[in-house]
Image (cartoon, grey):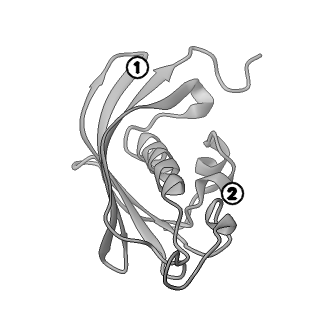
């Protein structure tokens, strides 16, 4: 599925910060979403690498992958939790319990970014969620982490001043 315009308009980041191009899977029952992210040499941070074919091959930057955990969690927030940034909800990473860079992701093949909410506590104005992230390229695990995020309802719609 391609990304819909309402999702893109609701995002706290512009499309150049989201970096997805498609939804691979949404499983509401399992509280899981998978997004596809193209990989190329012009990705942020990746585009500044001083590469060497042996000592420092071109790869998707690790800091960018951490950023992408927030973006795929936002997609989960939108599509699985059904919440909207435009209605006053905002989210922030809370804690990285563990993170493992399993392999380098060379530019070329897209990555599939999986976000599975393993537990959450919810009230009318906040959600504390814990996520298992798995990023794969051509079926190979590239990155895995266990993180939490706090989603807050600010009480003011996005367009309110």
Report if residue 133 is visible in the image. Answer: no
Q: Residues within 10 Å of mark 2 (few under 14, many from 20)?
A: few
Q: Position of residue 13 (x, y in %)?
A: 65, 44
Mark nearest the camera among 2 and 1 is 2
Image: 17 above or below 110: above
Image: 153 above or below 103: above
Q: Which residue is nearer to you in this view: 116 or 159?
A: 116
What residue does disc 2 label?
A: 16
Q: Which mark is residue 78?
A: none
Marked residue nearer the N-terminal end (2 or 1): 2
Q: Residues within 10 Å of mark 1 (few under 14, many from 20)?
A: some
Residue 6 lies left or right of residue 35; in this view the side is right
Q: Residue furthest bottom?
A: 53
Q: Which mark is residue 126?
A: 1
**Please, what secondary structure does the residue beneath circle 2 have?**
helix
Quarter of the figure with the C terminus: top right
Residue at x 64%, y 68% (from the top left corner): 49
Residue 17 lies left or right of residue 100; in this view the side is right
Residue at x 50%, y 30% (from the top left corner): 91
- Label 2 and label 1: CA atoms lie apart by 28 Å
**Please, what secondary structure does the residue beneath circle 1 have?**
strand
Q: Position of residue 152 (x, y in %)?
A: 47, 21
Q: Residue furthest front?
A: 55
Image: 71 above or below 103: above
Report if residue 47 is visible in the image. Answer: yes
Q: Position of residue 135 (x, y in %)?
A: 36, 63
Q: Which residue is nearer to you in this view: 143 or 79?
A: 143
Residue 90 occupies quadrant: top right
Q: Position of residue 130 (x, y in %)?
A: 29, 36
Residue at x 44%, y 27% (from the top left corner): 151
Q: Which residue is nearer to you in this view: 154 or 47?
A: 47
């Amino acid at each position: 599925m391609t990304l819909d315009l309402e999702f893109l308009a609701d995002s706290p980041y512009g499309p150049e910060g989201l970096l997805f191009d498609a939804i691979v899977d949404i499983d509401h029952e399992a509280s899981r979403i998978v997004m596809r992210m193209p990989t190329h040499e012009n990705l942020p941070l990746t585009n500044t690498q001083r590469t060497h074919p042996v000592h420092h091959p071109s790869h998707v930057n690790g800091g960018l992958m951490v950023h992408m955990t927030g973006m795929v969690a936002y997609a989960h927030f939108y599509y699985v939790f059904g919440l909207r940034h435009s209605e006053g909800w905002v989210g922030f990473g809370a804690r990285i319990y563990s993170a493992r860079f399993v392999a380098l992701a060379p530019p070329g093949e897209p990555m599939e970014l999986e976000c599975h909410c393993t537990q959450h506590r919810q009230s009318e104005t906040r959600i504390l969620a814990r996520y298992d992230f798995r990023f794969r390229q051509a079926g190979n695990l590239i990155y895995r982490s266990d993180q939490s995020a706090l989603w807050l309802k600010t009480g003011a719609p996005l367009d309110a001043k």
